[in-house]
Image (cartoon, rainbow, N blue to C red):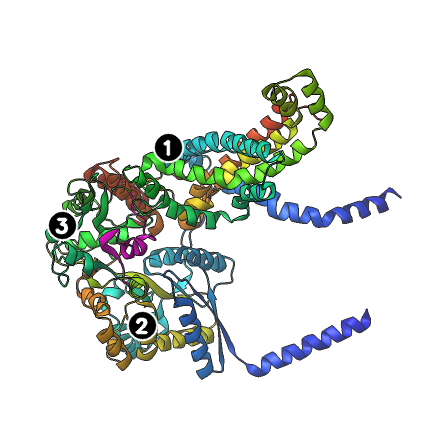
Amino acid sequence: MTRFLKSSILGAATLALSMSSALAVDLEFYFPVAVGGEAAATIQALTDAYVAENPDVNINAIYTGSYADTTTRAITAARGGNAPHLAILLSVDMFTMIDEDIVEAWDDYLSEDEIENWIGGFYPAFMKNSQTEGKTWGIPFQRSTPVIYWNKEAFEAAGLDPETPPTTWDEMVEMGQQLTIRDDAGNVTQWGVRIPSSGFPSWLFTGLVAANGQDGLANDAGTEVYFDTPEVVEALEYLVSLSTEHEIMAPGILDWGATPRAFMDGESAIAWTTTGNLTNIRNNAPFEFGVGMLPAKVRPGAPSGGGNFYLFSGHSEEEVLAAIDFVKWATAPEQAAEWSIATGYVAPREDTWETDAMREYAQEVPGALVARDQLEYAVAELATFEGPRVTQILNDNIAAAVVGDKSPAEALADAQREADAILAPYRQ
Amino acid sequence: MIKREWIHAWLLLLPALVLLFGFTHIPAVQTFIDSFWSTPRGRRPSTFVGWDNYARMTADPVFLRVMTNNLIYAAITIPASIAISLWMALFVHRRIMGLGFLRMAYFTPTVLPLIAVANIWLFFYLPGFGLFDQIRGLFGLRPVNWIGQPSTALYSITAVTVWNQAGFFMIFFLAALQTIPENLREAAALEGTSRWTFFWRVTWPLIMPTTLFVSVNATINAFRMVDHVFVMTQGGPNNASALLLYYIYDQGFRFWDTAYAATLTVVMVVILAIIGIGQFFLLDRRVHYR
């Protein structure tokens, strides 16, 4: 027994010695993967490359499931006093994180020069969901925006110009009618358009709202929502009319996850989904396809989306600075270009698009540029305090209108009333 | 002298007790206490609110919808699973060609994780090009958006549950059938008893303990098996397929309203306790144990 004790004490002492001699800063970093493919491997490769360049820092990159799983794990870990240093979470979770009081504003650790040149270098569209109360809470990284994908072969077969996608709501209806094909029994074999409505329909719906002239669905402080304005009601009426009045979209709730499959199988000729699916569709679609901006009503418009880096509270200054240094490195042009090309996410800074790798990629995949050009018209994604709950209220009511349980005006009036009740305490 | 034995007894019980209290009893009591407090946020600490959370619950239309859904879900999955599993057990309890293969085929759905099952069924249900609609297409029937319309969404996920758990219950029935002595069957044959009478008068009473066990499990599963809801419908459209446990998860881990989630959990535990006690005390009298 004594002998065993002695040897284990000796072992522990040696271990402690060897650890202190390295003097490394250990960072923990949670990341989600929301699109298929290379994302997880690319993040691992990026952190490995950083650690190789900076031997005094050790980064433990932990894959934590979907966005929702990652948020759950980060909040649980932070409540347990064991927060990660960094996590990539949805940009719209900003208010939840502030409300939980578990994240730090980046500005407090940055010099004036860094705030101007580094923070200032991101596209303003991506900073809309990253700043509030005059501070920066998220650094854009895994960012996306919805676009339309159209099947050029189906366009040609329907007698349309395969190089011209619909650019307005009316054009989408007209082209959709030509693209919707029925067999002799009257069953549809190809739908004109697919706007998925399962899970989080509010995101694509924000694209319709923006196109109809309203800048998003909430204020910058996250305390007010604008669900029942005439612009929003009209947007929902248009969405519903696609399957009821015009019959160019399948009725009922259309699954988000099955949308790339439905597009590639020829079930729908036009599909609305994220740029994050670009690489997947490019690799697997058996036909030529195009990528275009969301159609306009009174103006072009789309929401931004995706994830930001968050800096968690409860760590030493040395660790926080090391974490910031890693994020600055990961968002630098070379690394951001590599990340964007591997996944299809939109590079969030102008300087990334000026790298050689990115120029080559844009030449090869013109669709990638569409997302960047659309940023000019981008509005904020719906983000408020109690964000998931408020978003769920809107999602439920959009679904109720889509399946015909409520009229669009009723659904949105209900959504406004319920959201107001939840947000009231935050308005004092 | 007594003390020493008592200490030994407690020491031996200690590991099990620590686990039981740490993971079952203390959380249950804590949940009950939490249901009388407001949800703490980083900037606003928790306060005592009495019955407020319960009042909110009874006035919550989504809660009422979720409870209704769960009752329908239970009312279908429990009898359907028992009936189908018993039928399958009777079917594979004979000497027929390919018996091993049949038994394995019936049991396979149970081996698959519910999440994987849900992903497969998601593609069965896809409107237009899913398996069911392709079959319907052969007969010239219109495509149906099974999980995307409120009238069929709940029944679609119910079918997945029955498919997934019936094979598991079949194993218990099969084991019970094999304990029925062969001489009873021979005696019944001599008397010229019909197969139905034999089943109703002999088999059914003898497997009653197994039926009780299976029905308790099916009841618990009706409140516990919600994994496929996450994959297939996320409770939609407009909560048409949301179940109680799914709603608790949403409140607790998506909206971080832990107090309200605790309140809902108390309701669920009370319901399960009443059903469990009722099944054991009422049905037990009618069950014939040997």
> Which residue in the protein does label 3 denote?
A178
Instruction: In this rendered view, identify the residue nearer to me: B187 or B229.
Output: B187
Mark 2 touches mark 3? (CB < 8 Å): no
Chain under callout 3: A
Drawn side of residue B96 relative to residue A414, left or right = right
A21 w.r.t. A406: above or below:
below
Mark 2 or mark 1, whichever is nearer to me = 2
Magenta residues, start to end: A253-275
Q: Which residue is mark 1?
A: B59
Image position of A183 (left or right of A58): left
Q: Residue furthest front?
A: B97
Place of residue B1 in the rendered image (x, y in percent of width and height, measured from the top left): 89, 44
- Distance from Cα at disc 2 to Cα at disc 1: 50 Å
**Residue A280's x, y, as percent?**
33, 63
Query: What residue type is disc 2 on?
Result: Ile
Could you tell me which secondary element the residue under label 1 belongs to? loop
Measured Cα–Cα span from mark 1 to mark 3: 48 Å
Q: Amino acid at mark 1?
A: Ala
